[in-house]
Amino acid sequence: MWQAEIRVDLDAIRENVSRLCAGTQAAVMAVVKADGYGHGMVPAARAALAGGASWLGVATLDEALALRRAGITAPTLAWLLAPGLDLHLGVSADIDLSVASVGQLREMTAAADAAQRPARVHLKIDTGLTRGGATAEDWPGLVEAAAKAQADGSVEIVGIWSHFVYADAPGHETIDRQLAAFHDALGVAERLGVRPPLRHIANSAATLTRPDAHFDLVRPGIAVYGLTPIPGEQFGLRRAMTARARVMLAKRVPAGTGVSYGHAYTTTRETTVAVVPVGYADGVPRHASNVGPVRVNGTTFTIAGRVCMDQVVLDVGDLPVSAGDVATLFGSGDDGGPTADDWAEAIGTINYEIVTRFGSARVPRAYDGGTGE
Ligand SMILES: *Cc1c(COP(=O)(O)O)cnc(C)c1O
């Protein structure tokens, strides 16, 4: 018996990835960072591979190593590497590593020496996001240094890559500008004799809307989990995560009753309040106070008053709601119930943040379909 749970539909993940694969000639890297966007990194990775992904993408070295410990051998790229990590563990575990500076490249060659095999690297160019990646000015120096390290046998240049600013706004001028900058960077590399097999820049939004940005590999994340990168368009994707809890207590209270901390909500008539045992410690944003939607017995209610650490309260009027009934915060949306998109809109964030928040240790995850391992 569960009191609160995250259900993850692994068949939905597998099918979403199949759909993404069918929409491109490029190889598909399923991004499973941040514990698979809150869905569970290892089960999500297995489902994505079953759906046809041939690569996995993660932010940190630890995430990549956790995939290997789980026995997953698919090519994996890790791109968020602070100085001083034990990169040789990544090299030994056959993990591809992103490089954005000559200093980082030196760490890769040292790791390669320690692991006694070449480090597989993807050179990152900053085409306008101004986050990771080498500037256009620093790019030739990085490419030259990498080419020399490759000639020395300490690295293998597997890819050149970049990341979009605003692909979730189709038609935004940054998209074409970044593509032009990416082509320029590829041209510079080629003139320096570096022409790696994998060029990649597309996130979910570009994978779904910009075939001219697919190159050799696409890196969808949010779409893998059935969530749209572009609010209002679903692209036929199936949302994989459901967050739900059982009503703990339902009771009648009179009109004028203040509800939850601060009495930020007051009943306007005699009514039933239902207490649901999930709160901000479980991932429910506190900003959802008085706005978060929750579905019980086919009706969607709005959270009454403040979200507490462990609980929220609903005002369910005279509808028959009792202890033990299932309260769904968000799910597939197939039954007309709330979705992570609805939650994002209600609190002014993006669906990405809603699902990744629900990764607390307290709410168990259960898996449908796939193997769940
Ligand atoms: C998170 C991430 C992605 C996936 O982005 P989505 O918008 O979820 O598809 C791709 N590439 C990089 C570098 C990322 O950090």
Image (tube, rainbow, N blue to C red):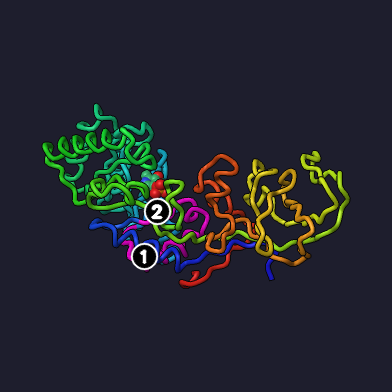
Q: Which residue is mark 2?
A: 31
Contact flag, marks 2 and 1 (Cβ < 8 Å) = no
Give the residue furthest to the top: 137
Quarter of the image holding residue 285?
top right
Tell me the element at label 1.
helix
Which region is colored magenta?
30-55
Under mark 2, the amino acid is Val
Q: In the image, is 181 to the left or to the right of 294?
A: left
Tell me the element at label 2.
strand
Viewer-proximal residue among 108 and 160: 160
Is residue 34 part of the magenta span, yes or no?
Answer: yes
Under mark 1, the amino acid is Leu
* Pointer 2 local density, CA inside 10 Å: few below 14, some 14–19, many at least 20: many
Q: Position of residue 117 (x, y in %)?
A: 26, 54
Viewer-proximal residue among 199 and 114: 199
- Please say if 298 is above or below 103: below
Residue at 84% x, 43% y is 258
Q: Position of residue 13 (x, y in %)?
A: 43, 63
Q: How many marks?
A: 2
- Residue 185 visible, this orientation: yes
Q: Which residue is mark 1?
A: 49
- Please say if 18 is above or below 285: below
Q: Position of residue 199 (x, y in %)?
A: 23, 47
Badge 2 or badge 1: first in the primary sequence: 2
Residue at 25% x, 49% y is 211
Mark 2 near ligand 1 (CB under 8 Å)? yes
Q: Position of residue 185 (x, y in %)?
A: 20, 36
Is residue 372 part of the magenta span, yes or no?
Answer: no
Q: In the image, is 258 to the left or to the right of 118?
A: right
Q: CA distance from mark 2 to mark 1?
A: 11 Å
- Residue 61 visible, this orientation: no
